[in-house]
Image (cartoon, rainbow, N blue to C red):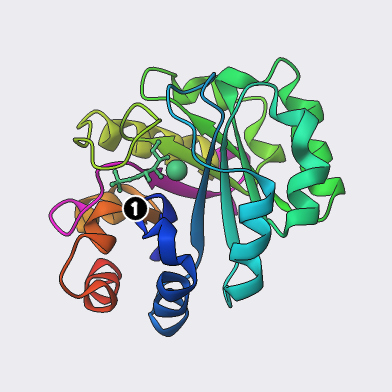
Amino acid sequence: MKLVSPSLLSANFGNLQHDIEMLNRSECDWLHVDVMDGVFVPNISFGQPIVKHIKFHAKKPLDVHLMIVDPGRYVADFAEAGADILTVHYEACTHLDRVLHSIRDHGMKAGVVLNPATSVELLEDSVQLCDLVLLMSVNPGFGGQKFIENTYSKVRRLRAICDRKNPQCLIEVDGGVNLQNASALYEAGADVLVAGNAVFKSDDPVLTIHQLKQ
Ligand code: DX5
Ligand code: ZN
């Protein structure tokens, strides 16, 4: 699969409606929504009230990436705000099994996110509870960072684990994705690419989204 999920972290927060309408017209598949609490990551972005407004304008599924401590506490809130896919960090969950069940019980697709230094092999006993796994290809917290090359190896190793344990599970990559590395990521086994700066800082975001899907 070749899906693109543009990250609204790089959109114009002063006029989100304008950028969401552009994404509605584009060939993108999901809208990637980065929630940061200033504790799990150094940056603060936005919370449920903004997600609700994004949902109101969006015509595509919301792919909500929680970069917050103890995300299990907020599963019901983000379901209510309109998340279709909810991903939580492996590093932030003491009881990952419980959180993943809870996400599905609230009617959303469930995903785990791994930081760059967290090994995919740790998912051997949880990947069967996931609709997707998100691999961070930068240290989370900010848009516009440099892609970490070790991600290719992680995608390939995760693909092998998914093939054995949960072939339906999608692999998503987030951070520093651009027109230069997109095709190699799909080739390595990625299904969904998140792109913030590559889309929103380009002269023609609709065209860039089209090119990312090629
Ligand atoms: C980083 C966020 C990403 C970010 C990606 O912590 O999770 O989704 O917006 O931005 P780019 O594509 O610019 O690296
Ligand atoms: Zn993200």
Against 87, residue 68 (above or below) is above
Q: In which quadrant of the rendered view does residue 180 lie?
A: bottom left
Left or right? Give the position of 177 relative to 95.
left
Q: Nearer the viewer, residue 11 or 186?
A: 11
Which residue is at a point 31% across and 31% down the rendered structure image? Answer: 138
Q: Residues within 10 Å of mark 1 (few under 14, many from 20)?
A: some
Local SS, label 1: helix
Q: In which quadrant of the rendered view does residue 204 lie?
A: bottom left
Q: Is residue 87 magenta?
A: no
- Which residue is disc 1 drawn over? 10
Which residue is at a point 61% across and 20% down the rendered structure image? Answer: 92
Coordinates of residue 26 in the picture (x, y in percent)? 38, 80
Region in magenta: 164-181
Mark 1 residue type: Ser
Q: Nearer the viewer, residue 89 or 151?
A: 89
Which residue is at a point 38% across and 53% down the rendered structure image? Answer: 194
Left or right? Give the position of 35 relative to 79.
left
Q: Is residue 172 magenta?
A: yes
Against 12, residue 159 (above or below) is above
Which residue is at a point 42% across and 75% down the rendered structure image? Answer: 18
Residue at the farthest bottom position: 25
Q: Nearer the viewer, residue 17 or 143?
A: 17
Residue at the farthest front position: 14
Q: In terms of secondary structure, what is the magenta stretch mainly?
A: loop
Q: Nearer the viewer, residue 211 or 1?
A: 211
**Residue labelled 1 has its Cβ within 8 Å of some atom of ligand 1:** yes
Against 64, residue 38 (above or below) is above
